[in-house]
Every structure is written in structure tokens, then in C-alpha cells.
Image (cartoon, rainbow, N blue to C red):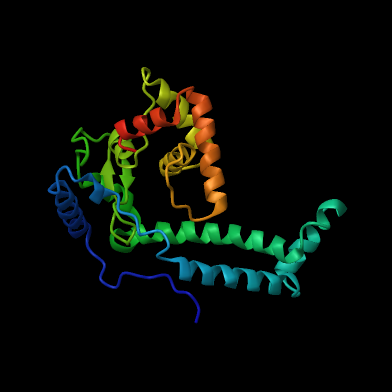
Amino acid sequence: MSYKRPINESPLSKADKLDLLKEYIENYRGLGANREVLNRKVPRGAFDELLNSLGETLQAKSAELASTVGPVRTFLDDNKLTPAIAKRLKDDFRVFCLALNALKQWVAAEQAATDRYLLGGNARELCRAASNRCLVTNEALGTDCELHHPVRDGRPPVPLSKRGHAEIERQLPLEGDDAIGQALLPLRRKSNQSWAHLRSGCLDLLGEPVTWTSKSTKASAQTFARKAQAATNIGYEQIIDWMDEKEL
């Protein structure tokens, strides 16, 4: 069975869409200070079975395409590797890499389409028009407001100010008098690691018990913590204290 993009079979008028969004946003505003509801994540591992199945399909199909006459095989032949690299990159792995890139583009297009499911092609403009104040900071929203998905389950995004969005995502702005933040924030972005990994790495190096999902996760978290310690020139306990202060 071929994939068909989900389509809303009961489209709304523009006025109905705005009414729906205003009620939706006011519902979140009524939840008050409980900002956790604005950033719900599905539990890690919930889709492990599905993702494993997709991975198996990608590998099997990549191996098939690498040895089958067609556009993919032609592409490989037209983009030959140097002899040294050719010894180390098998054709099925090359196709797997190409397939991952194609999948990434497909996911981006399909995810964008989910925002249009309820609201149509003007989804982003409608979301911005539905509220003039940030749900988090209550400051007036300008043209540079950001759209944030409280839950990635098809519900529309909500408009937030840049400061409100940073607060929800725990992406703190760099403050001139916060030397620790000045050192850690660029390091975190460069390493692409989470605050949770930094905390776990610090705790582990302090000799505290930490549950690890894998040896590689433990090693990367420890490395992150050591780099953080070197960048800030403070101890692991002080790094944890800073994260506690910032509620990270």
C-alpha cells in the first residue's frame, strides 16, 4: 500500500479557524504558571519498535537499490569514489546515506504538512493573528514572535515571544554578568549535548550513581562535563549548582 498524506476531510472557514485558535490559546493561558504543559515530549523509547523497523527497511532497501539497475545505481556509477575511499565505503552504505538524506527531506515536508492539516496554507499567519500577548511572559507579541508546538501530536503551534520561547525550551540568553553561562552555552551548542547529559556527566565524575543507557553515552557525557569544567574553571558541584539555579 502506497503512502498517502493525511488530509482533513472537514475543512474550516478562516473565521472558524481563528475562533478555534483563540479558544485553544486561551485554554493554555488558563493553565497559568504550569509552563510544563507547553513543552510535553513523548517518553524516550516510545517509538523504538517503529524506528527499528524503519531502520531495517532502510538498510534492506538500500542494499537492494545498490545492486539493481536504476537511477540510484546510475547515480553511484556517475559519482565514483577515489580508489582509497572506494575500499572503505560499500555501495549499500553509500545508498543508505543517500536514503537517510532523502528521508530527512521527506520528514521535513510531511511535518510541515501537519501544521496545515487543520489550518491550511496560512497556518503560521493565523496562529500569529490569534493572540497578541505571549503565554509565558505576557509581553506584547511583535512580528518576530516564534511559533512553538506544546505537543507534536497534530495540534497547532502557539505564538510566543523570543524570551518566552527560550524560557520554555530552557535556552537561556547569554547574560553579561553570568560568566558560567557565557562559557557553557556556546560549549553546549557546539557539542550538541543536553543539560541532562552535562548533569549526569558531572555526577558520575563526582562518584555519584548514574544510570547509563550505553557506554558511549557515558563516555560522551563525561567528556562534556570535563570540557565544561575546563571552560568554566569551576568544580563539577558548582556546575550542578548553576544548573539548579537556572532550573536546567
Q: Is residue 88 above or below residue 69?
A: above
Residue farthest to the left, as pictured: 30
> Quadrant of the rendered structure where residue 129 is?
top left
Question: Which of 98 and 123 lies nearest the eye of the viewer?
Answer: 98
Question: Which of 147 and 182 lies nearest the eye of the viewer?
Answer: 182
Quarter containing the C terminus? top left
- State left or right for residue 89 relative to residue 106: right
| Residue 34 pos. (x, y %) | 19, 46
Which residue is pictured at 18% across the width and 35% down the height? 138
Residue farthest to the bottom, as pictured: 1
Q: Is residue 119 above or below residue 28?
A: below
- State left or right for residue 141 relative to residue 93: left
| Residue 56 pos. (x, y %) | 58, 71
Question: Which of 57 and 196 lies nearest the eye of the viewer?
Answer: 196
- State left or right for residue 131 relative to residue 113: left
Regarding residue 187, the answer to whether it shows in the image is yes
Residue farthest to the right, as pictured: 83
How many numbered discs, if any?
A: 0
Regarding residue 172, the answer to whether it shows in the image is no
Question: Which of 157 and 175 lies nearest the eye of the viewer?
Answer: 175
> Quadrant of the rendered structure where residue 21 is?
bottom left
Residue farthest to the front, as pictured: 207
| Residue 169 pos. (x, y %) | 34, 42
Which residue is pictured at 30% across the width and 41% down the height? 168
Q: Is residue 131 above or below residue 179?
A: below
| Residue 232 pos. (x, y %) | 47, 24
Which residue is pictured at 53% across the width and 49% down the height? 217
